[in-house]
Amino acid sequence: MRVAAVLIALLALAGAAIWLFGAPAPVPALIAGLPDDGMRGAPCPAGTLAGERARLKQGVPPPAALGRKLRRNFPLGSDAGALEALLTAQGFELFPPCPNDESVSAARWLSRRWGEPDAFVYWRADDAGKLIFLDGQVSRTQ
């Protein structure tokens, strides 16, 4: 009985070590080599009037390199399904970014290595599935 418990514990530790220290996925081609845009946050509506005023004081951030690249490859009016297919094929995870706005879609790629990029992509599509908003950013932990 003790041998089985020890064996199970060792297997669990080995599995955890592989998960923690195993080879992480390579950086997706979409974001490889792009500069750090910093964290910008999702394009969600402010939850309060005070939040909206704070956002207005920050002003419009400069265009992010990933956002420019995405809009070159997927101009507004193009099929949102093709964007989503590319993102999932490159290992991005889809997630709902805005609890107060279901019209915003998002995908993220989170690196498991220090200094490698994380990326977030946000978009909106009309009723026909065509892009009406598209942006993205890359950030790195320094």
Image (tube, rainbow, N blue to C red):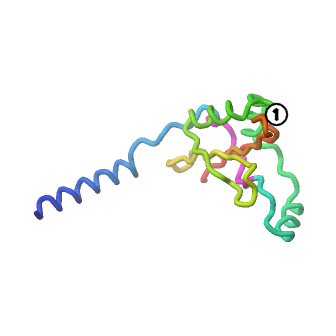
Residue type at mark 1 is Leu
Picture coordinates of residue 115 (x, y %)? 57, 48
Relative horizontal placement of residue 21, taking residue 69 as reference (left or right): left
The residue sitting at the front extreme is 127
Q: Toward the viewer: 20 or 35?
A: 20
Examine the image and state in which quarter residue 64 appears.
top right
* Pick the front one: 127 or 35: 127
Question: What's the magenta region?
Answer: 31-42
Q: Give the dominant element type of the magenta stretch: helix, strand or loop.
A: loop
**For the point 50% across and 48% down, which residue is it?**
113
Please say whether residue 35 is one of the residues in the magenta stretch.
yes
Residue at image x 62%, y 32%?
86
Left or right of residue 39: residue 141: left
Residue 9 horizontal/vertical position (percent): 23, 59
Looking at the rendered structure, the secondary structure element under dot 1 is: loop
Q: Which residue is mark 1?
A: 76
Residue 60 horizontal side relative to residue 110, left or right: right
Image coordinates of residue 102 in percent, x first then y, are 73, 53
Left or right side of 107 for 40: right
Give neighbour class at mark 1: few <14, some 14-19, many 20+ (Cα, 10 Å): some
Residue 125 x/y as whole percent: 77, 40
Q: How many marks?
A: 1
Q: Is residue 128 above or below residue 96?
A: above
Residue at the spot x=64%, y=45% of the render? 107
Quadrant of the frame with the N terminus: bottom left
Is residue 92 rendered magenta in the image?
A: no
**Which picture quadrant has residue 52?**
bottom right
